[in-house]
Amino acid sequence: HDMCFMMSLFLFAKTSHTNLLYHFDHFSIRPWGSMSTIIAHTFLTHNRRPSKPVAGMLLCAILSDTLNLLGPTTTEWDRLMVAVLAEIAEVDDIQLLASQQFKAKSKELATMSAPALVNGDQKTFSFDASGFQGDIGFAVVETTEDDAILSRVDELLPEMVACKKEKNLQCIFLAVVNIVKLHSNLLLCGPTEHALASKAFGGNVTMDGALMDLGGRVSRKKDYIPTITSVIKDGWSKPENLGRGLSMVDMSQLGKLEVDPNDPHGNVTRVGSVLDSPEMKGKKTCESADKESEEKKDDVEDQPLTI
């Protein structure tokens, strides 16, 4: 009934020059795909019509949050508010707007530094289960040009390790999502991340264990965190004798973040970090490091004992 009422209100708003006069006489709980959908809905439920610029901003925000209404968290309320806001903002082609918006966003992401990409859209989730306690950081980069981001894995992995240590995280992940193909890849900066992701997602791993194909999983809220949470609640724990990878470095060796004076975009970069040294960049991070460790262990065990 609410949906029909809101559509009627929308049609009224198109033809009436007066303020919107209506109210809800009850409370309800419903899912939302975007905070901006809630804001747009609140405008209407308070008898207010957003201005054209505000409607345009809210429209773009909903399209971004819901991946042009194609993401798994999209609701009918998001679709309805997009229709309402597009009319108010006088947007004739929503698909064209979304395409231009995503291209602009991807162009900006291509200029961002590794610290900006790792920390920009990162959320922390706390766990206190029988086998795992601590915080997990999960960052997401949404782009139309995922190859451009994935080509910078050698930059991103050390920064993920630095962020992990600075924030005292037990794990950190970075998902690179192609928002056109609705496909994602997960960056794994160490053996713990590799072990947990393998249990949770089981995707094909490449780049010496540093990259996992997540297929059509594109939502942190619906695809990533619920799956990780389920695995941890089921008793997952960090495997014994797991290597430390790049996280073996001391905090004092991570350098510091500074604004790059030569960058026209004012990007923040990390300077003076041991992780950027040739020796550390050549160090295996995940699966291959574990295999090498096991192979060395086997070699030692196979050696004859000399008395």
Image (cartoon, helix red, strand yellow):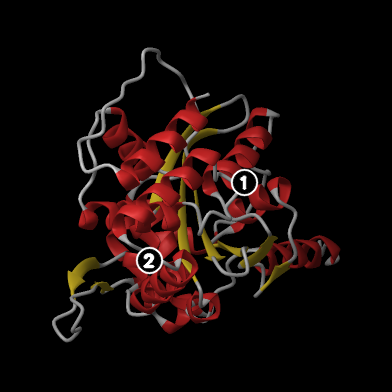
Residue 304, position as x, y percentages in the image: 86, 66
Q: Amino acid at mark 1?
A: Asp
**Residue farthest to the top, as pictured:** 26
**Residue farthest to the bottom, as pictured:** 262
Residue 138, position as x, y percentages in the image: 47, 50
Q: Nearest the camera: 305 or 232?
A: 232
Instruction: Give the Cα distance between marks 1 and 2.
Output: 20 Å
Q: Which mark is residue 267?
A: none
Residue at which label 1 appears: 223
Residue at 50% over, 31% down: 3
Residue at which label 2 appears: 117
Residue 222, position as x, y percentages in the image: 58, 42
Residue at 31% over, 65% down: 253
Q: Looking at the picture, does residue 40 appear above or below residue 267? A: above
Tag 1 and tag 2, C-beta contact below 8 Å: no
Graded by Cα atoms within 10 Å as few (under 14), some (14 to 19) or many (20 or more), the crowding at tag 1 reads some
Using residue 241 as the reference point, say whether residue 281 is left or right of it: left
